[in-house]
Amino acid sequence: MLPRKSLPILLAVAWALSWGCSQTDVQLGEEAPDAQQGFTPPVLDASVEAGPDARPEQLLACIGTECPYPFATCASGNGPSYKCGTDLAHDSLNCGACGNKCLVYEPLKMTSRCVDGACELECMNDPSRPTDRRNCNGEIDDGCEVDVLVDPNNCGACGKVCPGGQPCVKGKCACPPGQLACNGACVDPNRDDENCGGCGNACKPPPGACATLPPRTYYGCEGGSCGLKCMGASADCNGDVATEQCASNGCEVLDLKTDRNNCGGCGIACKANEECIDEGFGRECAVPCTRFGKVFCPSLPVDHRCVDLLTDPHSCGGCGNVCPAAGPNQIRSCNKGMCDLECAPGFADCNGNATDGCEVNLNVHPSNCGACGNRCDIAAGQPCVEGKCLMTTCDGKEIPQ
């Protein structure tokens, strides 16, 4: 069976053949009647001729010169201003109109950003520590007044009150196992010098306290009781503080964090190829960096000694081999142990000069629109909008290029 869209064509051909065959016979050498008029095919109904799959009328594309919404030409203090180079719907420096800047309200812990051409307020969190600030009372005057990670009256969410004076820890009403809630804070009663064995029990030198304290000791809380205690990470590995008290040699191990013979605890000795390190699992004897498949670089700062020589731009191909600094709109990277400079998304190094970085914004530059060398018709006033030379239909309606 023929497809439906072929029927109009077959009908037209059949009609034409029947029309021609019905005319008066013509002898060889004779001219057919009305031959000078030629053959004119019949005009079929437009709806039948077009059919269900007919293509829409094609519109002609012309050079566009007027900025389409939400793009506009705004002055820039950071570089050249390009025609239609500002997105008024999302630019926080030009939100809804050129020069309309979305502000930051530091004392209120609030900021604002441009959403669909309007500055919308939102809470601002502290970058130096985990916070989750909320405007729980709905008032703008005091801004985002609550941090729901620590507020017992708004713990985890506005209006969620912790019962029984429990503190709010990381947005939850409870202390970790083994800790007590004292004055709205979680404390370890086994080691907290101000809450030793219970809330409010502060350790102080007792009657008959040592006139001269043993080395690296003080009166504090250990095991839930007040007494002589080691300072910091020092340790009494020979156990004489408990027995000899004032006559002891104190906490003779200087630092359990670094002592290879007492690594993380008394008597834990490291092997010749091991170090006393903490790689996220507490102090332990281990070969540095091997569990992460990295290389140990002892010449680097303590917190940066585990290095992936294939990807680390600060130790690319070798310990301490720093890749060159990136220029404007460039990203410094280390790929397979080789330093590389890549352009940030939307930018390109069109002049081939590494000293000025990736100097061209391909989204707005009319001489390098979408790609280096792709030039818009600048003389006609054609702008580059989102990486494309602006085109419109000839009746003025914008269409994609």
Image (cartoon, rainbow, N blue to C red):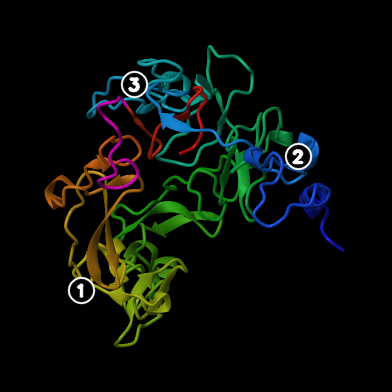
Q: Earlier in the sequence, mark 2 or mark 3?
A: 2
Q: Secondary structure at mark 3?
A: loop
Give the labeled residue for mark 2: 42
Can you say which quadrant of the picture contains the C terminus?
top left
Looking at the image, residue 187 sits to the left or right of residue 74; the answer is right
Give the labeled residue for mark 1: 318
Q: CA distance from mark 2 to mark 1?
A: 83 Å
Residue type (three-letter) at the residue carrying disc 2: Pro
**Mark 2–mark 3 CB contact (< 8 Å):** no
Residue type (three-letter) at the residue carrying disc 1: Gly
Can you give x and y, in whole percent of width and height, for residue 48 in the image?
80, 40
Callout 2 crowding tier (Cα within 10 Å): few <14, some 14–19, many ≥20: few
Front position in the image: 225 or 293: 293
Give the labeled residue for mark 3: 73
Per the rendered image, the range of residues in magenta is 369-381
Q: Secondary structure at mark 1?
A: loop
* Residue 329 picture quarter: top left
Disc number placed over residue 302 in the picture, else none: none
Residue type (three-letter) at the residue carrying disc 3: Thr
The secondary structure making up most of the magenta span is loop
